[in-house]
Image (cartoon, grey):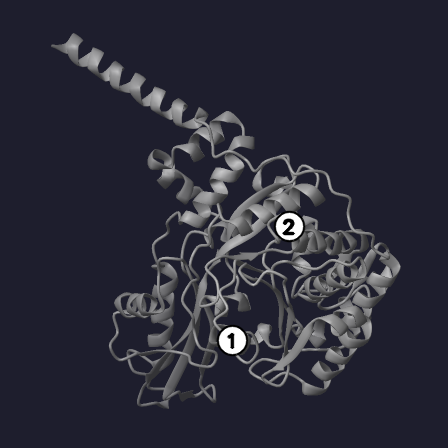
Amino acid sequence: MIKRLTLTALGLVLLLVLVLVGRTLAPRPAPPPAAAAVPPVPVDATAAVGRLAGAIRIQTVSEPEQPPDQAAMLAFRTYLEQSFPNVHATLTREVIADGALLYTWKGSDPALKPVIFLAHMDVVPVDPATAGQWTRPPFSGDVDGGYVWGRGSLDDKDNLMSIMEAAEILLDNGFQPKRTMYFAFGDDEENGGYRGARVIAQALASRGVSAEFLTDEGGAVVPGSMLGIASPVAIVGIAEKGIVSVRLSVSAPGGHSSVPPARTAIGRLATAVSRLEAHQMPARITPALAGTFDAIAPELPFPRRLVLANRWLFGPLIVNQMLLEPQTAASLRTTTAPTIFQSGIKDNVLPTDATAVVNFRILPGDTIDGVVQHIRDTIHDTGITVAPLTTPPGRNPSPISSITSAGYRALQQTFAQRFSGVRVVPNLLVAATDSSHYGAVTHDIYRFSPVAVPADALEAVHGINERIGIDSYVKAVQFMAQLMRNAQGD
């Protein structure tokens, strides 16, 4: 009997090994066909960089919870007209909702579904306390040391200007699209896109527009070492997290601090927030993250490839390892971030009210309603009011876009043509873009910037010394021109 059990156990172990190795070595989905060599469009680098620098100098700043600065936006729209005469002579331009822009480049074949290119004109403010820490003034648009410096150079005037430069060059070369293309430029993305992108999306939907795919900011071309592989990586967001901020508030009798009750308003609310941090929403591997693993696994050493290829067995190990770092943990769960705490007027007065705001970035599969229920279940205090903020309103996670669609294949083809040796990796975007407003217009939304960004420069987005490499920007213009060609489906 013991011998039989031993043989059975050995057989099961052998079977497990065969399954693990077999899944690890199993053929992966075939890569896209090798892209035919296509020379890049010629770009006058000095002129193109100069136009980007000029765009940066226009301070189209979105202040928190404020409407866009109309004078700055008008100046920027005028600058685009002056900078891209071919585009404005050929495409139809509409000013939507007092400041956002929609360009229509009519295709020759109305049977083909259109393509939409998104970008935004506004930028985040510069913290006055950090202005002196910039190597170049934040709105200088200085061209120095191989970079264009200034707020918006990576978020998001590089994308907007590269789209316009690409269209101007293609028009110069006599290009006529078969497929209609839209350029949609919001003016309040940094405040959620509710005044600009949402209204553009509603206008397109009301016209019956159903797009083949849509591109927006989100990823970048980064060193492969960031994901543990040798090849450079083009990160393409195929989904993005939702977002909601929730206010927690509690009231108490107040009084003199010399005779405090057992539970003060501040103490009660602090306990609730502490519980939320200690008991966060469950972590899991979403289909978007699974796509990331599948894309990088073939380039990993065998042991790591074995783990990623057999997530049915090693999933808990992967999750536990990723939860150790905030950057990777954010891809696994709806995050909990207390951001505001307000209470009290004097050191010896017990406050009668205390409020806190907690920001949640919602993982695909979770919802705003689920977050609110999680809060109530976790804090165990019916005396604390829980209410999602409506300014700005929350939004649920986006659907996950296809990685087998014609649009995704066009992206893969274009990256192969313009970035040597790059591996295109689908990803979950943990931040937010205004592409989330376009769900009624297209099923396939791809979030990326065709810009090579060193790891140390990524921190400059919304931070100090935001800048873009001159060569990277020229390459972005060439990428956008090639993508517009490839999007025609020839």
Q: Is residue 50 left or right of residue 33?
A: right
Where residue 393 appears, as percent x and y from the top left, is 44, 77
Q: Nearer the viewer, residue 439 or 289?
A: 439
Name the residue located 63 percent from the left edge and 40 percent from the top edge.
224
Label of residue 486 in the image: 2
Looking at the rendered structure, the secondary structure element under dot 2 is: helix
**Amino acid at pointer 1:** Arg
Residue 141 shows in the view = no
User: Sequence order check: which comes first, mark 1 or mark 2?
Assistant: 1
Spatial CA distance of label 1 from label 2 is 27 Å
Looking at the rendered structure, the secondary structure element under dot 1 is: helix
Total labels drawn: 2
Residue 152 shows in the view = yes
Residue under numbered circle 1: 198
Of circles 1 and 2, the one toward us is 2
In which quadrant of the rendered image does the N terminus lie? top left
Does residue 112 lie above or below 404 as drawn? below
Name the residue located 47 percent from the left edge and 89 percent from the top edge.
345
- Badge 1 local density, few (<14 within 10 Å), some, or many (20+)? many
- Badge 2 local density, few (<14 within 10 Å), some, or many (20+)? some
In terms of image quadrants, where is residue 25? top left
Does residue 250 lie above or below 475 as drawn? below
Where residue 52 appears, as percent x and y from the top left, is 79, 66
Does residue 42 lie above or below 435 as drawn? above
Name the residue located 42 percent from the left edge and 33 percent from the top edge.
309
Q: Is residue 113 left or right of residue 278?
A: right
Where residue 120 appears, as percent x and y from the top left, is 64, 70
Q: Nearer the viewer, residue 135 or 416?
A: 416
